Amino acid sequence: MSKTRTIAVTGASEQDATRITSLLERHRHKLSHPWESGAAADAALLLVDIESTYGQMDWLRARSRGRLVIAYTSAAEPLEPEFSLRKPVVSGELVALLNRFGAGINGAKAEAAAPMQPANAETYDASSAPVAANATKRSATPVERPVQIVAPMPPKMDPPRSQACFIDELLGALDATEGPLRLVHEGLPSIIVDPARQRWYAGVGGLKPLAGWSRHPLCRDQLIHLDTAEFANATEIMSAQPYSRLIWFARLTRSEGTLDPGLPRDARYRLTRWPLVEREFPKHFRIATQMMRGTGTIQEIAVQSTAGIADVVDFINAYNALGYVECQAMLPVTAPNDRSGLLERVRKSLRN
């Protein structure tokens, strides 16, 4: 009977670690050798999130001690693909990686291997300097290499603004016949989009980790098309999210306290329906409550909801993108004997 080997995940989010454990259990029958999650000190294979706060240090320390280590990264083209696993992990890639490394592990630990403790503020001190010094002497694993893994994408990968659009604009332009797509950019969690069902998937908890996508320009030639099997593997334990949620968040993040064109600063605003308020934004519940009570200016809504002016503006922009906001323009006050119609008064107001 094959000996059970252990894989330890360090630096990754709790959701990613749980996902990997779940995939190990679900696809146990596909593994050539039994694997299970374990502690870093005794693991046969370390999976290090090199984009976490101390990920680079953990990665360097493990390599310098002769540990078998894999970089967990969102990079589209990792420096060492054979020693990398891309975020969010999918079952096919995880199984292939474990089968490849399982065949080369004889069950014995490397002689130079030492117990590894995940890096943190307490362990990140001068005591790690000798480790770094020893690592520079290893010609096979120079310390410069892992630093390059999280380097910015080459300039040529950034499309010209004239040919690019933001993610909320992209979702509105995608055709259902294009099939599932993966959006990948270095340093950002990858997003999988299903235009046919107008759903998206991401292996992160909450929306705030996706903030970088709101400001990142995208071109169609950067989209990675997935076939049916790839899409199924990538989303098998992810929850489908509606387009509207990502569109809302993109507009909110990019708003930055400035009203969208066409929304007057002195108009009165109200919500036409109760929105799905995100728990990550507690102020929004108060703003929504106030805007459901009736119309108000931005200043009035901010005062009555005890929120900032910028928060109210961002809220209005985001929900206006979904069609939840009604705007009532302020009309000029008329004299008692003014018999002009409403339409004429509106025209005069616009001309002025």
Image (cartoon, helix red, strand yellow):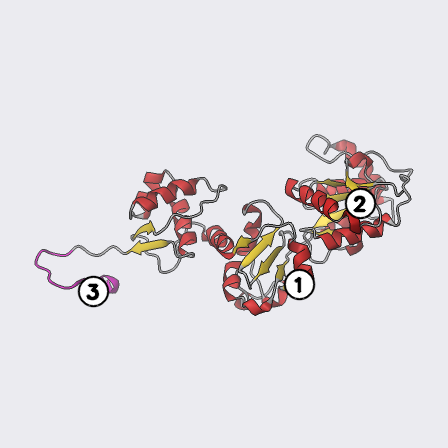
Instruction: State which quadrant residue 302 falls in.
Output: top left
CA separation in Å, label 1 and label 3: 55 Å
What residue do we see at 45% from left, 50% from top? Answer: 256
- Contact (CB < 8 A) between labels 1 and 2? no
Residue closer to the observer: 4 or 15:
4
Where residue 322 sits in the image (x, y, percent)? 42, 56
Residue closer to the observer: 82 or 156:
82
Secondary structure found at label 1? helix
Residue 58: give its label.
none
In the shown orientation, is residue 93 left or right of residue 254? right
Whether residue 92 is visible to the viewer of this picture, yes or no, is: yes
Q: Earlier in the sequence, mark 2 or mark 3?
A: 2
Residue 228: give its label.
1
Q: Is 95 colored magenta in this rendering?
A: no
Whether residue 7 is visible to the viewer of this picture, yes or no, is: no
Which circle, 1 or 3, is nearer the viewer?
1
Where residue 104 sits in the image (x, y, percent)? 89, 49
On the image, numbered disc 3 is attached to which residue? 343
Q: Quadrant of the C terminus?
A: bottom left
On the image, numbered disc 2 is attached to which residue? 69
Give the mark count.
3
What residue do we see at 50% from left, 59% from top? Answer: 168
Q: Earlier in the sequence, mark 1 or mark 3?
A: 1
Secondary structure found at label 2? strand
Q: Amino acid at mark 3?
A: Leu
